[in-house]
Image (spheres, rainbow, N blue to C red):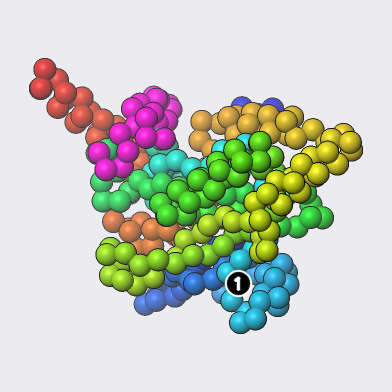
Amino acid sequence: MIKGLAITPPILGRISIGRMVEKNGKRLPEKDDQFTITSQIQNKDGWVKHPLDEQLRAKTPNQKLRTIPVRMIFNDPELNLRAEYSLFDRQTGRPVCVGNGETCQRLTNQGVEQHPCPSPDLCPLAQEGNCKPYGRLHVNLDESDELGTFIFRTTGFNSIRTLAARLAYYHAASGGLLSCIPLQLTLRGKSTTQSYRAPVYYVDLTLREGVQLHEAIQTAQEIKQQIQQSGFQQVALDQIARQGFANARFEVSCEEGLEVGEEFYGEEKHKQVHDVSQVQEIQKGLQQSVKAVH
C-alpha cells in the first residue's frame, strides 16, 4: 500500500444543504433549507444532481427534500463521522494544520510535525476564522453498492455536535450495531442571537419515520444474524477502514481542500492565505515570546 495516501470510503456523490451562486462575478456559497444530492461532476451551473435526488424528492409532498433514508456502513461512530479542526492553504487547498483540540499535525518546512492544539479560539494560526471544525459524514444511500457512500461535508458546530452525539447514542443503545439500524438524515432549523433570529439549518440523524427505538434495535439484531450467516465480517470491515484512514498524516486531499475553501469560506478565502513559510514565521514568534517570558 502507498504510504501517505488516506484510503477513505468510496464516494458516489455528495449531500449538501447549500449551493454556489454567482454574485458580482464571484462564486459564493449560499445556505439552503433543504438537502440536495449531487454526483461528483460539475458543469457551468454547478454540481450535477444525482438521480437519487429526483427519486427521493418525488416522494415528498412539497418537493422539499428534508429527510433522507440512510445506512451507516461502519459500526464504529468515528469511522462514519470524521471531524477535526482544519486550516487549509487557500491557494493550493492542501491542509496546513489539522488538530483535535489536544494535538495537531502541522505542515512545516521540516515536514509534518506534531504540536499541541489549543483549539481555534486560542491558536495564533487560527485567527480571523482561518481554522474551522471540518466534519465529513459517510452514509450509504444506494443499496446496489453497499460499500459506496455519499458524503455530507460541514464546518458547522451544530451539525458536527448533533451527528456525533446521535452516532454515539445509537451505537451504545444497540450494543454496537450501528450499521444495522434504519436511520435517516433530518434537516432542522433554529434561531440564535448570532444569526439575528434568522433560521440556521443543521443536520440531525434520527430513526426512520414511524420506527421506535426498541423496534430499530430488534431489527438490527435480526440483520446481524442474517449477515453473520452469510459470512459478512463487519468487525474486519471496520478494522480495514480504520487502517485506511490512518495511512496518511492528512486525511483530506488538496482537491477536497479547494472545494472546502470555495463552499465554506466564500469571500473569506481571499483575506489571508497560509502557506508553510507563514506557519514558520508564526511559530518563530511564539518561540521568541516564550523565551522572553522565561
Q: Is residue 109 magenta?
A: yes
Q: Position of residue 118 (x, y in %)?
A: 30, 34
Q: Is residue 202 above or below residue 229?
A: below
Please name the residue shown 48% across and 71% down the image: 32
Q: Position of residue 30 (x, y in %)?
A: 43, 70
Please name the residue shown 39% across and 76% down the image: 23
Q: Residue furthest front?
A: 214
Which residue does the numbered mark 1 point to in the structure image?
65
> In this orientation, which residue lies closer to the viewer: 161 or 253?
161
Q: Is residue 175 left or right of residue 204?
A: right
Please name the residue shown 36% across and 56% down the image: 269
Quarter of the image containing the N terminus?
A: top right
Quadrant housing residue 253: top right
Q: Is residue 38 left or right of residue 144?
A: left
Secondary structure beneath label 1: loop
> In this orientation, which residue lies closer to the viewer: 61 or 248?
61
Question: Magenta region: which residues?
Answer: 100-122
Quadrant housing residue 124: top left
Q: Position of residue 190 (x, y in %)?
A: 40, 66
Q: Is residue 45 above or below residue 104?
A: below
Q: Is residue 67 left or right of residue 232?
A: left
Please name the residue shown 61% across and 66% down the image: 67
Quarter of the image containing the C terminus?
A: top left
> In this orientation, which residue lies closer to the viewer: 263 or 210?
210
Amino acid on which disc 1 is placed: Leu
Q: Is residue 206 magenta?
A: no
Q: Position of residue 226 (x, y in %)?
A: 86, 41
Q: Is residue 28 visible?
A: no
> In this orientation, which residue lies closer to the viewer: 247 or 102?
102
